[in-house]
Image (cartoon, grey):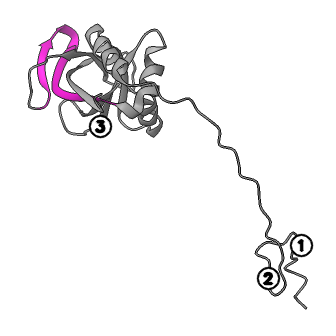
């Protein structure tokens, strides 16, 4: 059994003109690709009319860990498994984002969303990635069923002549001794 496994993705970021008077551009993660060539930062992929631009940044690891099986199962059981790409703001850069990571863990993605920093985009998981993840999960043994622990019975110490008891059932009132 492997404890963890890793694969790499390229992140495709897309910029298009905004229709809002308060923003010039809309940035979104358009896709993730496997076997993307290594880039040194964001690489321009294509420029279309009206300011629509696509960039590629690769490679970015996705590591599955054996202790996160429940999270991955929750992702798969939705019927439409997703990957989440987390981007951090990088003012002054072009494009103005830095890839923080790629995850298949919905709880990690929720934590990034709750921080309200950067951009977190949900992308459909590629079929090859889903098959890779399913193989990894099938190799992990089933976790033992939860068994609630029973509390031991309290044994009150017998009071023996000359020995103070460790526990008494009498309550002590802290204000009783004050004058």
Q: Calculate the distance from the C-alpha at mark 2 to the C-alpha at mark 1.
A: 13 Å
Q: Mark 2 points at which residue?
A: 164
Residue at the far front in the pictured view: 161
Q: Name the residue under label 3.
A: 89
Q: Calculate the distance from the C-alpha at mark 3 to the C-alpha at mark 1.
A: 62 Å
Q: In the rendered view, would you say 168 is above or below 5?
A: below
The label nearer to you, 2 versus 1, is 2
The residue under the point 65% across, 43% down is 149
Badge 2 crowding class, 10 Å Cα cut-off, few under 14, some 14 to 19, many 20 or more, is few
Magenta range: 41-65
Mark 2: which secondary structure? loop
Residue 33: where, in percent of width, then height? 21, 15
User: 25 and 10: which one is in front?
Assistant: 10
Mark closer to the chain start, 2 or 3: 3
Determine which quarter of the picture holds residue 37. top left
Mark closer to the chain start, 2 or 1: 2
Residue 93: where, in percent of width, then height? 18, 36
Quadrant where the N terminus is found in the figure: top left
Badge 1 crowding class, 10 Å Cα cut-off, few under 14, some 14 to 19, many 20 or more, is few
Residue at the far bottom in the pictured view: 179
The label nearer to you, 3 versus 1, is 1
Mark 3: which secondary structure? strand
Residues at badges 2 and 3 in contact (C-beta under 8 Å)? no
Magenta-colored stretch includes residue 66: no
């Amino acid at each position: 059994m492997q404890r963890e496994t890793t694969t790499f993705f390229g992140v495709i970021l897309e910029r298009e003109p905004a229709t809002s008077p308060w923003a010039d551009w809309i940035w979104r993660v358009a896709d993730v690709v496997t076997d993307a060539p290594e880039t040194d930062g964001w690489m321009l992929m294509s420029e279309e009319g009206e300011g629509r631009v696509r960039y590629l940044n690769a490679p970015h690891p996705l590591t599955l860990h054996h202790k996160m099986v429940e999270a991955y199962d929750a992702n798969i059981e939705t019927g439409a498994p997703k990957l989440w790409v987390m981007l951090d703001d990088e003012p002054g850069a072009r494009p103005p984002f830095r890839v923080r990571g790629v995850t298949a863990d919905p709880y990690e993605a929720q934590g990034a969303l709750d921080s309200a920093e950067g951009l977190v985009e949900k992308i459909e998981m590629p079929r090859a990635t889903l098959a890779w993840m399913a193989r990894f999960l099938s190799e992990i043994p089933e976790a033992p069923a939860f068994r609630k622990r029973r509390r031991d019975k309290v044994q009150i110490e017998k009071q023996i002549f000359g020995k103070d008891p460790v526990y008494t059932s009498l309550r002590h009132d802290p204000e009783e001794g004050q004058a």
